Amino acid sequence: MAKSLKTPPPYAIASVDHALRLAAILQVEGGLTVSGAAERLGVARSTAHRLLAMLVYRDFAWQDEDRVYRAGRVLDVAAHSEKQTSALRTAALPHLQRLAELTRETANLIIRIGDTVRFIASVESREAVRVGSREGMAFPAHLTTAGLLLLAELSDAELDNVYAQERYAGRPDERPDLVTLRVDLARIRRNGFAVNRERSERSLVAIGVPVRGRTGAALAGIAVAVPTVRYDQRLMESLLTDLSSAAVAVGVAVGP
C-alpha cells in the first residue's frame, strides 16, 4: 500500500502550528533566542515572544540567564525513549517480584527525567497493611529515594542546570534548597544507598539503591517502600542486601 501524503487540516490554527514548530526546534536543535524564533517562523518578535512565553508556562521550554530558550522538562520526558523504558521495565519485573517476595514489601523501579522521577514498575506487597503501587506516577526527584540516588550521580554543574532558577519562574516554592540538597547527595554517594523517611509521602519509608548498567552508569533506582508502622531500623542490613542483589540482576539483564 502506498504511503499517503500528509495534508494540512482544513482549519489550521497558525498559533498552534507555530508553537509546535518551536517546541520541535528546541528539542531537536537546542537553544533559541526570540529573534531566532521570529526569523524561523517568519513572524514578528512580539509574536515569537508570546509563543515562547506560553511554552515556558507549560514547561515545554525554559529561559537561561543569557535569555536563550531551551527545551523544558515536558520535552525531556518525550525525549526519554519509550523503547528504552519498556526494555528496562521488562528486564526488571522478575527481579522486582522476587524482591517483593523476599522483603514482603512493595518494590519499585524508578527513572529520573530532569527534576522529576517516574515509577515505571511496581510490585505490591501481599501484606494487609502495605504501600500501594505507584506505577505511572511522577514525583519531584529531590523528594524520593530513587530521585536522590540519581541526582547524586550528577556533577555540580549538572545539578545547577536541573534546578536552574529560570525553570521555576512562577513556582519558586517548588525549587529545593541546593545547599541542603548537596549535603544530602554527598551522604548518599558515601553510603551507596538512600533512605526516605516520609519525605515524599506520610506514613512511608523507602530504601533504595541505584541500578547500574555494564558501563557503570546509573540507569534507574530500585526501592522498597515500607509502611512506617512496620519499619524497623534493625532490618536495614537485610533490606540493603536484597536490594543490592536485585539491582545487580536488573543491571545485568538490561545491559549497558
Image: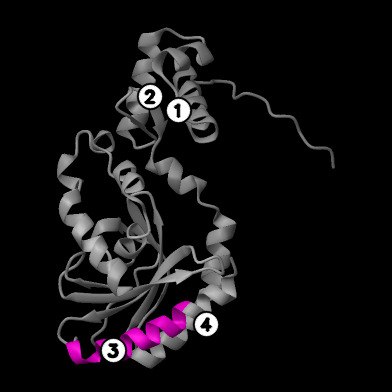
Q: Secondary structure beneath disc 2?
A: loop
Q: CA distance from mark 2 to mark 1?
A: 6 Å
Marks 1 and 3, the one that precedes in the sequence: 1
Residue type, numbered disc 2: Val
Q: Is residue 228 left or right of residue 38?
A: left
Give the residues drawn in magenta, as a range. 233-247
Give the residue at x 55% y 55%. 82
Tell me if I can see residue 232 in this picture.
no
Q: Is residue 89 left or right of residue 152?
A: right
Q: Dot 1 corresponds to which residue?
A: 31
Image quadrant in which you'd find residue 168: top left
What is the quadrant of residue 157 in the picture? top left
Per the image, the residue denoted by label 2 is 68
Estimate the spatial distance between the alpha carbons at disc 1 and disc 3, rounded to whole Å: 47 Å
The local secondary structure at tag 4 comes to: helix
Q: For the residue marked with disc 1, what is the amino acid?
A: Gly
Q: Earlier in the sequence, mark 3 or mark 4?
A: 4
The CA distance from mark 2 to mark 3 is 48 Å
Q: Amino acid at mark 4?
A: Pro
**Picture residue at 39% right of the left edge, 27% below the top:** 69
Residue that badge 4 annotates = 94
Q: In front: 233, or 11?
A: 233
240 within the magenta span: yes
Label 3–label 4 contact, CB within 8 A: no
* Image coordinates for residue 203, horizontal then vertical, percent: 16, 75
Q: Residues within 10 Å of mark 1 (few under 14, many from 20)?
A: some
Q: Which residue is mark 3?
A: 237
